[in-house]
Every structure is written in structure tokens, then in C-alpha cells.
Image (cartoon, helix red, strand yellow):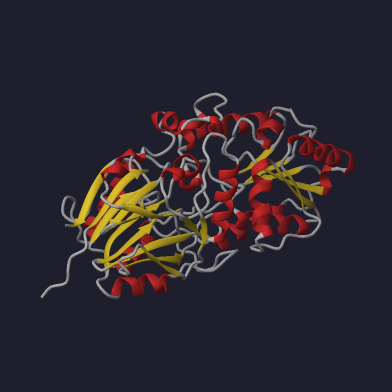
Amino acid sequence: MLGEIMEVEIATIGGYEEVGRQMTAVRAGDDVVVFDMGLNLSQVLIHDNVETEQMHSLDLIDMGAIPDDRVMSDLEGDVKAIVPTHGHLDHIGAISKLAHRYDAPIVATPFTIELVKQQVEGENKFNVNNDLVKMDAGETMSIGDSGKVDLEFVNVTHSIIDAINPVLHTPEGAVVYGLDKRMDHTPVVGDPIDMERFREIGREGEGVLAYIEDCTNAGRKGRTPSESVARKHLRDVMYSIEDYDGGIVATTFSSHIARVTSLVEFAKDIGRQPVLLGRSMEKYSGTAERLDFVDFPDDLGMYGHRKSVDRTFKRIMKEGKENYLPIVTGHQGEPRAMLTRMGRGETPYELEDGDKVIFSARVIPEPTNEGQRYQSERLLRMQGARIYDDIHVSGHLRQEGHYEMLQALQPQHVIPAHQSLEGFSPYVDLAESEGYAVGRDLHITRNGNMIQLVE
């Protein structure tokens, strides 16, 4: 007598035609779990002065800014949990627009939950009353009433703290949602990636039924360096300009707490007072400090409001630029960010010949960003600034990391995600070299498709 077979199907809702607006739903029997509800920021940036907080979800769907979740009505089951993997906007930015449609809690790690909470509080159009449930990496919870489906969080390392890969354990095998990680065994903040657990999941029970993977750097050879490498690079640059007696300004991803921590520390080392400036700088670092992820110096100023930022700039000009290191928003050249305003001469901070600007970030390879960053750098240079750029390591796996994950998990099915069709192709080659075949167990999909794994 064979046990009953549980149906497993996957709806690939967003992030399968672009990087951004990630959303995937997995149905196991009658229970559905949604992974990520993200925003595609570049679709918003190309419109002038769009305030997404004021907009209706349907307009944002039409604009291509958030996932078109209408395909969810084709899934024969009830949503039991909404699970964002980490706090980047392309993974949580649509929660405030879509989550209220589902009678399900939002389950995430503590830092991610805090960012979701802030996202929801800033929303002006919809009331999001879903329960917020904190779960740490390494923990498991039961999903639905069958007693047969469990959700587990496995610790991973990414360019934001408290990132996980969720695993849905079903009687037919595990579904591993593998978006946004790199293999970091020596991260600057937080624990290393839990490869041991991934290998166990690959070997226990029915093994891994399906692996959904972020393909961002699948075309790049070798492995992604650890954050500790970026830290050394940054230290090298900052120590080399220790004797400069003018202005030094740094910028990085506000959500990249590990990098901000390094900048703060090295500023002190070279005799400068670090200060965090810009709305998102204050938001992410303030949240990380409040939740005890980092221990910043007591005298570290964080200012988000424009008036208080400008007051700080005035104080810096009065007391001497050589005594401070402003750590500011604007690494992508965003029009309203601090660094861009500094380049346009719209702040009290005056850049002079020889002043140093450190970009501890890489340009997101997308035309809007590339154009804005180019403009920002030109403006800074026109004021005499010297630019140090690409002091950064990626948050995503390269080829060798992908091979290692496939070997650890040995999934029956592989679903590439988090890219355009062009971005999938290097991953498809890599997976085929490992014995997978398109149309058999390697599924190239688009937004709004269903993949039936177990019938």
C-alpha cells in the first residue's frame, strides 16, 4: 500500500523576467507559502517624482513595479505564510501593496521583520494588518494543518544582515528557495553561511525536490570574495589617504551594515569623526543598532532629515572638513541622495580640489543607474574631487558557488530566477554541465507561469 502523494506546484510570479519584484509561491497539498514580495525600483525611477506610498497596487502592477499576483487565484490552496528572505526592497518592497490580500502571517528574521514593519508604516494606500512573526535562522515552524509540511530558515550571507534561504519540507522532498546569497565563511557581521545544513538537507528524507536559484553572477568565473576582502580593500584605501588634510567623503549601500561598520571603524583609525547622513543611512543603521546587530560608537551621529543633515554639514565646514568622514547616500547617483546634492553644490559642504570621494559600491548594471552615477561622478569631478570606486564585493554567487550548491543539494529539479532570459543562459549552461536538461528537470520560466513538480 503506497502512501498518498502530495501535489507540489510552483508559481513563478515576479523576478523571472528581470532583476527585481521577486515573488514565488509554492503549493504543497492545500498549503501555499509565498516567498518574497519585491519592488522593481528601476521601473519607478524612470518616472519623475513617483510616490509609490500613494499609489494603487494595480497601477504599480501595470507599471511593472510590483509582481502581478493575480496568477495566485490559479493555485488550489490557501496562503499560510508570506516569507521575505531579507530586507532589500526588491524582496520586501511590495509587501505593503499586496500582503493585505492574503490571510497569512509574514514570517522573517528579526532584522527583516523590522524593515517590513517600517515599510508597512510608511504605506498610505492600504492597511496591512498581517501578523508579523519573527523566526531565526536555524529554526523551523509547521505550516498548515496536515502536520506534513514544515518551513525552515537556513542562515546565508548576503550584502545585508540576517539573510536566510527558506526551505519548505514536504513529504515529496524539500523545496529550497535559494535567492540572494554568497558563500562567506568570514563575514564581518553575523554568522557564516550554513553549508553543513544545506548538505544535510540534500541527503535526508526524500532529498531536495526543487531548488530555485538566483542567477545574478552565474556568468562570472571563480568564487565571490568574502566581505572580509572588501574590508581589507577599504582599509587599504582609507589608510593610504590618512595624511590628507581636506575633505574625505564615503558612500555605500545604506542596507550594507557590515560595510558601514568598517567605514565607521576606519574613519576613527585615521583620526576622523564618522557621521551617517541621509534618510536610508539613518533607517538601516539605526535599526541594526537598536536590534543589537552592531555596536556603533556612542558619539556616532546619524541624521536623515534634510535640515539636520544640512546643519551637520555646516558644523563640519566650521570645525574643519579634515576632522570628519561623512558617510552618505548616493552611490548610484540617485537624484535626491546626499552625494548627488553635494555634487550639484546644493549642500553647505564645499568640495575642493583634491577632496576624496570613496564609492564602496558597484554600479547596478542597469541603464538608469549607470546614467545617474555617470552624472554624479562628473559633477563631483568638476568640483575637483578625486574618485575611488568599486571598493566592493558582490552579494551573489559566482560559478564555483553555484556548482557547490548543486553538489550540496543534488536537487531533482532546478529553477533559475532573479534574472532576465539573457541572465539565465550562463546558469542554464552550468546546470546542463551538471547533468540537468532543459524541458526535463531544468525549468526556464517567465512571470506568471506554473510549474507542476508532483501531480
**The C terminus is located in which quarter?**
bottom left
In the foreground, 23 or 351: 23
379 vs 91, left or right, is right
- Tell me if residue 393 comes above or below residue 149 in the rendering: above
Q: Quadrant of residue 68?
A: top left
Left or right of 409 on screen, residue 122: right
In the image, 72 versus 39, the foreground residue is 72
Residue 77 visible at all: yes
Q: Give the percent coordinates (x, y) of residue 329.
A: 65, 41
Q: Residue at x 77, y 60 (%)?
A: 297
Give the x, y percent position of residue 434: 23, 61
Q: Position of residue 296 (x, y in %)?
A: 73, 60
Relative vertical location of residue 272 with respect to residue 332 in this rendering, above or below: below
Q: Quadrant of the N terminus?
A: bottom left
Indicate the position of residue 418 as horizontal and vertical percent values.
38, 47
Residue at the right extreme, as displayed: 318
Report the residue that reaches farthest toward the left. 1
The residue shown at (47%, 42%) is 94
Query: Left or right: 74 with respect to 400?
Result: left
Q: Can the viewer see residue 444?
A: no
Q: Is residue 136 left or right of residue 405?
A: right
Q: Nearer the viewer, residue 105 or 60?
A: 105
